[in-house]
Image: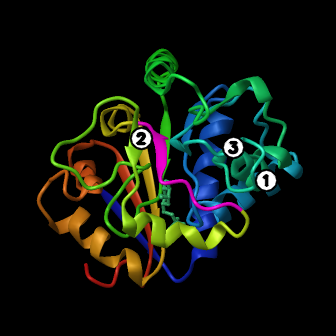
C-alpha cells in the first residue's frame, strides 16, 4: 500500500487527476470504477479541465459507478447518476452508452445486482476510485459481520445518513442503496482511495494499522496488491 499525504484537497485532486489522465492516455479504452461524494470532486475537475484543453479524451473510456440510492429518481439532483454527470461526464466527451450505474429504481433489485456483476466481470475494472465513510464503509458496504461479494441492496447506517443528509433539501434521504460488493471492488487491477478531513482519520488509521475485519470494510484493502491512498494531513493525523 502506497500512502501520499498532501496539504489540501486541491493538491490531491491534481495528483489523482493526473494519475487518471495518464492512465487514460496510455489505455484509451480503459475501464474505470468511479465513486461519488465530496472526496473525488477535485479529481473530476482536473480530468474535465484536461479534457476541455484537449489533453485527454474519454471517448472510448468505460465507467462503472460504485453505488446508487434506492427509489430516488435518476433525475433527482442527489442521485449518483446526476452527480456524475454534473461533476464529470457532462464536461467530457465520454459516451452515454459507456457509463454504467446500478439502477436503484429497478423493480427486481436482486436481478439488477446480478446483471451489474456480470457486466463488471466481463468488463474488468482497471482502476477503481474510492472514498471512505467515517465508519470505514466503501461504496455503500457498511460495517458488517462478513464481507460482501457481489452487488446487493443495503440498509444505510445512521452514521452514513447523518453524513449525507445535508445534501437532501427537497426529498428525504433514501435509507437504502444498491452497492458493488467488496469482492467486486477487490477485483479491480488497481485501487486509488482518497480521504480528506479529520472525520476520516479513524477509518484511515484502521485501514493502515488495524486488523482486516468487515467491521471496518475499508480494511480489506490491506489484501490488495496495488493500492494507493491519497490523504490530506487531517485524514492522516492518526497514522
Ligand atoms: C458515500 C458514498 C461513498 C463515499 C462516501 C464518502 O457514502 N457512497 O462512495 O466514499 O460517501 O463521501 P465523502 O467523500 O463525501 O466524504
Going 27% across and 43% down the picture, which residue do you hit? 224
Res. 185 image quadrant: top left
Res. 198 image quadrant: bottom left
Farthest residue to the left: give it: 211
User: Is residue 158 shown left or right of residue 101?
Assistant: left
| N-terminal label among 2 and 3 | 3
**What element does badge 3 sit on?**
helix
User: Looking at the picture, how far across and down is residue 236, in whole percent?
Assistant: 35, 78
Q: Front-most of 103 and 181?
A: 103
**Main SS, magenta residues:** loop
From the image, which quarter does the C terminus lie in? Answer: bottom left
**What element does badge 1 sit on?**
helix
State the residue position of label 2.
190
On screen, residue 214 above or below 151:
below
User: Looking at the picture, how far across and down is residue 32, in whole percent?
Assistant: 57, 36
State the residue position of label 3.
81
Q: Which residues are magenta?
A: 171-180
User: Is residue 65 shown left or right of residue 122?
Assistant: right
Between the C-alphas of marks 1 and 2, the distance is 25 Å
Q: Residues within 10 Å of mark 1 (few under 14, many from 20)?
A: few
Going 31% across and 69% down the picture, which residue do you hit? 204
Between the C-alphas of marks 2 and 3, the distance is 23 Å
On screen, residue 213 above or below 153:
below
Q: Front-most of 47 and 99?
A: 99
Instruction: Examine the structure image and report whether residue 177 is included in the region drawn in magenta.
Output: yes
Instruction: Examine the structure image and report whether residue 189 is included in the region drawn in magenta.
Output: no
State the residue position of label 1.
86
User: Looking at the picture, how far across and down is residue 25, in whole percent?
Assistant: 68, 37
Q: Count all numbered tags in the image, as a single digit.
A: 3
| N-terminal label among 1 and 2 | 1
Amino acid at each position: 500500500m502506497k500512502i501520499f499525504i498532501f496539504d489540501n484537497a486541491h493538491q490531491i485532486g491534481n495528483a489523482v487527476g493526473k494519475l487518471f489522465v495518464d492512465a487514460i492516455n496510455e489505455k484509451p479504452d480503459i475501464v474505470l470504477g468511479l465513486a461519488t461524494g465530496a472526496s473525488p470532486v477535485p479529481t473530476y475537475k482536473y480530468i474535465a479541465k484536461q479534457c476541455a484543453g484537449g489533453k485527454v479524451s474519454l471517448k472510448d473510456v468505460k465507467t462503472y459507478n460504485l453505488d446508487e440510492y434506492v427509489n430516488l429518481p435518476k433525475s433527482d439532483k442527489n442521485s449518483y447518476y446526476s452527480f456524475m454527470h454534473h461533476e464529470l461526464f457532462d464536461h467530457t466527451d465520454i459516451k452515454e452508452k459507456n457509463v454504467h450505474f446500478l439502477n436503484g429504481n429497478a423493480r427486481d433489485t436482486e436481478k439488477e445486482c446480478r446483471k451489474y456483476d456480470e457486466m463488471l466481470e466481463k468488463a474488468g475494472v482497471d482502476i477503481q476510485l474510492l472514498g471512505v465513510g467515517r465508519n470505514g464503509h466503501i461504496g455503500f458496504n457498511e460495517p458488517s459481520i462478513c464481507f460482501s461479494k457481489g452487488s446487493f441492496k443495503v440498509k444505510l447506517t445512521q452514521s452514513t445518513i447523518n453524513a449525507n443528509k445535508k445534501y437532501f433539501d427537497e426529498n428525504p434521504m433514501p435509507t437504502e442503496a444498491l452497492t458493488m460488493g467488496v469482492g467486486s471492488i477487490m477485483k479491480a487491477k488497481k485501487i486509488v482511495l482518497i480521504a480528506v478531513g479529520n472525520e476520516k482519520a479513524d477509518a484511515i488509521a484502521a485501514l493502515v494499522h488495524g486488523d482486516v475485519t468487515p467491521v471496518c470494510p475499508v480494511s480489506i484493502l490491506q489484501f490488495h496488491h496495488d493500492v494507493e491512498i491519497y490523504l490530506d494531513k487531517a485524514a492522516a493525523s492518526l497514522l
